[in-house]
Amino acid sequence: MTTAAATAVPTADAPRWPIRYLLFMGGMGGLLYGIDIGIIAGALPYLEATATASWHLTSQQLGFVVAAVLLGSVLSSLFAGMLADLIGRRGAMFVAGVLFTASIPIMALSDGYAALLMGRLLQGISGGLIGVVVPLYLAEVLSPERRGRGAAMFQLLLTIGLVLAALIGLYHAHAVDATTEAVRQLPVAEQQRLLFDVKDHAWRTIFWTCLLPGLVFTGGVLLISESPRWLVRRGRIDKARAALQRTVAPRDVEPTLQRIQAPDAVQTGASGKRDPLLSRRYVWPFVLACLVLAFTQATGINSVLAYAVNILNQAGLPGSVANGADVAIKLLNAVMTVVALVLVDRKGRKFLLMLGTGGITVALLAAALLFVKSEHGRLDVHAQLQQQVAGSSLSLPLDAAQWHRLDRNAGDAPQQLTVSYAYGGFSNVRSLRSDNPIDATLQIRREDAVSADSVIGAFFRRLHLNPFPDPAHAAQAPLVIERAMIGPVPSPTHGWLVAGCILLFVAFFAVGPGVCVWLALSELMPTRIRSNGMSIALLINQFVSTVIAAIFLPTVGHHGYASMFFFWAACTLLYFLIAAFWLPETKGKSLEQIEANFR
């Protein structure tokens, strides 16, 4: 039973600098998490240009390098909670910092595929640990009045990490372009040598620039105190008291310590036994947290950010303008996270989630309706393209006459063609525009769709299960053009309207789910299951994100962009209903008070 005294009231003599330092370290954790996700985008073009030639990397191996961070993150999410319980929250954060810092020289100094892959795996493992342990630590250490600010700082620096990674890549892109212009008058062999050197230096330098944040986080973690709640669970009451003295006012230390110890008393009944893990007080908040994390990804945020340029190109914006809009989207994400930082402890989590999901639903529906309008009336020319297939490939020059043959009603207006094709169980999508000089030929080859067998796929096939396509079968399968839709390129006005919808979507996401997801992850979980429960919930979050990213291109290739936006809007509407009717307000409540609400 809670009392009025259980609610902590911020006082003037509460320590300020230790709390600010904790917020800074939480933000640094978010910065590393954002760098983990975004840094490869800037390095990949130069890595592909140099490593493919010098190390003879295949496109599949480069794909593994890109995906290694996701794999490492999934693996570490499985044991992050267990590690945080075993060595403490601070200890797990230190391990994450060490792994991130160690990954940088391994990648930057790598001289082959194995070292590069190992560095990316370590970076992913670090990211998975940070995604669980940093929000967990902030929730357990900060007072109810500051927990929202801590989660917002984590998300803010995460978005800044994404922007920083993009800016680092942009800087080196300009440097490579400048070198390309400077060596144009040199002999071809000398040009190639100099460009190889500058590109090799570019991707290694991009990785090196991540070393300083890793060192700051790793060294800074040594100066913070351990979570008092973890110390209480280990029976280290004196150390818990000392940790509390760094984050709460002296008069609040003992009441807060008693409140932390209270759940151990109320979790046992008359028999002296703990409540079973399947009791409502554990299952319901765990399910709620998992739903919030799953539906956060089901809004489509990661796919929208990853494929923003593709989406805007299809909507009618030319390439350079679409790239500029993409930068604006990422900057808006960071700016609106600052707004969330101000509002989250004033307006509350429930209000912001309802506001955010409501706005996202409207923005997604508007974008879907815009794509319905632009995709209406397109022609399916897959039969014509299938007749052009020679053997197992297709090479079709797309000059003005060919575009006219595919769509005789087009006139002189620019056209776009979206082709969905498959080899066995492997499918891919190509999108081309008549006004883009790069799209002068429709080239479809087996190696662009069929990937090498993976360890996971081979494992399932040994069990006589077949959730993944078989590369051996696809190696002999014919090329099948499943769908090929041609129609006029939408107007730039249409493209800007879609860009406005996406900007609106990102703004509402940043204010609502972007910040509140980390709070739901840490605040809803009861103390007894918090660390392991957070690991499972984050794993569900990553699984949903991966599935949506995997189905995005096949779905838009088969059914158009409108179908994907309608699906995201439906998921976000369910998210709004969950926030409105099931999610409790946690603003200003201690973790123990939140837990008591579920009993």
Image (cartoon, rainbow, N blue to C red):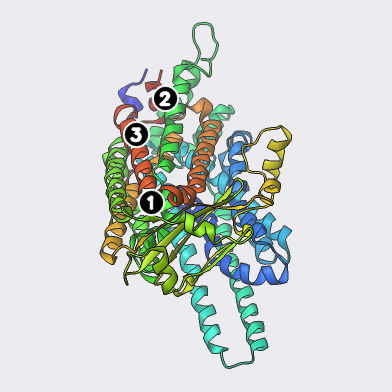
Percent x, y of residue 116: 68, 60
Q: Residue at coordinates 31% horizontally, 54% vertically from top-left?
A: 377
Is residue 324 in sight in this rendering? yes
- In this rendering, which labeled residue sits more in front, label 1 or label 3? 1
Kind of residue at badge 3? Leu
Kind of residue at badge 1? Tyr
Where's the C terminus, which quadrant? top left
Tell me the residue that label 3 is attached to: 574
Tell me the residue that label 2 is attached to: 595
Kind of residue at badge 2? Glu
Residue 21 as seen in the image, left or right of residue 368: right
Instruction: Give the Cα distance between marks 3 and 2.
Output: 24 Å
Tell me the residue that label 1 is attached to: 561
Residue 188 as seen in the image, left or right of residue 172: right
Closer to the chain start, of discs 3 and 2, is: 3
**Mark 3 closeness class: few <14, some 14–19, many ≥20 residues within 10 Å:** some
**On screen, 597 above or below 65?**
above
Closer to the chain start, of discs 1 and 2, is: 1
Closer to the chain start, of discs 1 and 3, is: 1
Q: Residue at coordinates 35% horizontally, 48% vertically from top-left?
A: 562
